[in-house]
C-alpha cells in the first residue's frame, strides 16, 4: 500500500509542477488580455469614427462630379462666346462705323 501511496504522491508532485508551469504561462499571457474598460473605450472610439464617417458622407454628397464640371465648363465657354459676340456687335461695329464716317468726312467732305 505504501508503494501505491508513494506513486500517487509522485504523480501529484509531477502534476503540481505541470500546473505551476501552466499557471506561469497563463499569467504571462494574461498581461495582454483586455479588460471591460478597454473594450468600452474601443466601442467609444468606434462610435466616434462612425460619426465622423457619417459627417464625411454627408459632406461628400455636396461634391461636384467630373461630369458636372465638364458640363459647367461647356456652359461657361458658350456664355463667354456669347458675351464676346455681344461685345463685337454692340461696341466694335458702331465704333467702326463712327471711324469710317469720320474718315469719309475728312477725305471726301473736306472744304
Image (cartoon, rainbow, N blue to C red):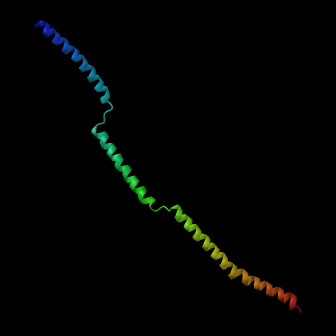
Eyeballing the image, is 35 above or below 76? above
- Residue 39 position in % (x across, y down): 30, 41
Seen as rendered, the residue at the extreme top is 2
User: Which image quadrant for residue 41?
Assistant: top left
- Residue 85 position in % (x across, y down): 66, 77
- Residue 104 position in % (x across, y down): 83, 88
Residue 111 vs residue 9: left or right?
A: right
Please state which of residues 71 and 37 is positioned toward the viewer in this rendering. 71
Going 69% across and 79% down the picture, which residue do you hit?
Answer: 88
Eyeballing the image, is 54 above or below 38? below
Seen as rendered, the residue at the extreme right is 111
Residue 68 vs residue 77: left or right?
A: left
Image quadrant where one finds the N terminus: top left
Going 34% across and 49% down the picture, which residue do you hit?
Answer: 47
Going 40% across and 56% down the picture, which residue do you hit?
Answer: 55
- Residue 23 position in % (x across, y down): 26, 23
Eyeballing the image, is 93 above or below 2? below
User: Which image quadrant for residue 78?
Assistant: bottom right
Going 36% across and 46% down the picture, which residue do you hit?
Answer: 45
Image quadrant where one finds the C terminus: bottom right
Please state which of residues 28 and 110 is positioned toward the viewer in this rendering. 28
Eyeballing the image, is 37 above or below 32? below
Exactly how many numbered labels are in the figure? 0
Amino acid at each position: 500500500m505504501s508503494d501505491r501511496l508513494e506513486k500517487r504522491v509522485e504523480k501529484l508532485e509531477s502534476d503540481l509542477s505541470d500546473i505551476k508551469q501552466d499557471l506561469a504561462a497563463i499569467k504571462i499571457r494574461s498581461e495582454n488580455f483586455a479588460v471591460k474598460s478597454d473594450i468600452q473605450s474601443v466601442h467609444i472610439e468606434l462610435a466616434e469614427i462612425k460619426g465622423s464617417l457619417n459627417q464625411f458622407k454627408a459632406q461628400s454628397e455636396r461634391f461636384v462630379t467630373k461630369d458636372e464640371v465638364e458640363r459647367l465648363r461647356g456652359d461657361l465657354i458658350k456664355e463667354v462666346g456669347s458675351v464676346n459676340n455681344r461685345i463685337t456687335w454692340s461696341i466694335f461695329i458702331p465704333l467702326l462705323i463712327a471711324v469710317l464716317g469720320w474718315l469719309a468726312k475728312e477725305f471726301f467732305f473736306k472744304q
